[in-house]
Image (cartoon, rainbow, N blue to C red):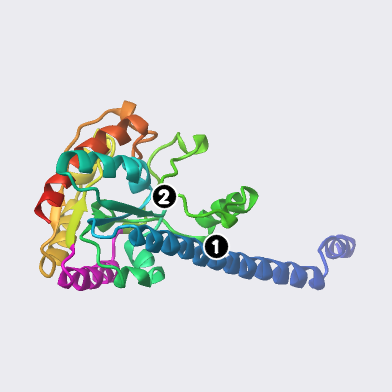
Amino acid sequence: MKKMDNSEQKAMPPLWVWVLLSITALTTIVILFRLLEIKNENDFSKKTYYLQNKIKTAGENPVIVILGSSLTRCAYDSSSTMENFIQASTGRKPVIAKIWRSATNLETIIDHMPVLNDIHPDILVVEANMFCYSAEQSLINEIPSLFYNVADQEISKSYLAEEKPKKRFDTGQIKTRRGIIDTSQLRSFRQLAMFLKAQGTRIILVNIPVEVSEEVKKWNSAEAVNFKRNFNYIQKEIPFIYWDPKLSWDMSYYFNKGHLNMKGCRAFTQWFCEKLSQQVNQL
């Protein structure tokens, strides 16, 4: 029996190995968190630069700012396409700036882009889907995109507002959501919207349609009560305009069940620009 005890003791790594592994793991986590902070700071800095330069070109033309997530990225055609469409419909060519970020929420965008309090767009268009589910955000989820950005030298590139998903994004289902949006996110947006409303900005919330089975599931779930509560919370202080196209599109319009492909993007953009042209005529 003693011989077996001695052999087991010899097989176990010494204490210093465990200490070294623990220190290495902790150091790696700290470095990853810092890299993510740098990536986020750089990301929002580029978005701020883009937004400021877009608005500088407006002159006396109407300014329209669109805020959203990856759904917004996929749903809207290029700013120039929308600007030309509206000019043809109204005789006025607006300046349209798109600010989107995958797997994020409005509170994060607002906190990292104080410039939103300094600009006074004629119209602010917000992805209404962001008032329902909260984006899934965690270190584990962020790590793959961090390494991808480094490998593809994304960190050094400018913010590409018109960029569409690459092939690796084209498959799969809607990612797991963390849950219903929390009150702090609603409060953060309402505070910004109240400020902009006082400056004369018109607020429009747009429900970007997901694949028809997912859309039906979303609005017929028990959570739909909370979605309506969220909109009511904002509506009490901000008389916003709400658009829901209620489009029953099949998978031929989507990359996956949540993100529109170019066919869906063009169809949705036409619907959106027709609605938006009516608002521009009223400015």
Q: Is residue 209 above or below residue 39?
A: above
Residue 161, labelled with which disc? 2
For label 1, the SS is: helix
Q: Is residue 195 above or below residue 94?
A: below
- For the question of whether residue 272 can be seen, the reply is no
The percent coordinates of residue 67 (x first, y second) are 31, 56
* Span of residues in magenta: 180-201
Disc 1 crowd, CA 10 A, few/some/many (<14, 14-19, 20+): some
Query: Does 199 appear in magenta?
Result: yes
Please indicate, yes or no, whether residue 268 appears anywhere in the rendered image.
yes
Which mark is drawn over residue 139? none
Q: Quadrant of the N terminus?
A: bottom right
> Viewed as shown, does residue 73 lie left or right of 92?
right
Q: Give above or below for 188 relative to 222.
A: below
| Amino acid, disc 2 | Ala
- Taking the spot 19% from the left edge, 48% from the top edge, the residue there is 92
Q: Quadrant of residue 23?
A: bottom right
The spot of residue 274 in percent (x, y) is 17, 40
Q: Along the line of sight, which residue is nearer the eye, 271 or 15?
A: 271
Identify which residue, 208 or 100, lies in the foreground: 100
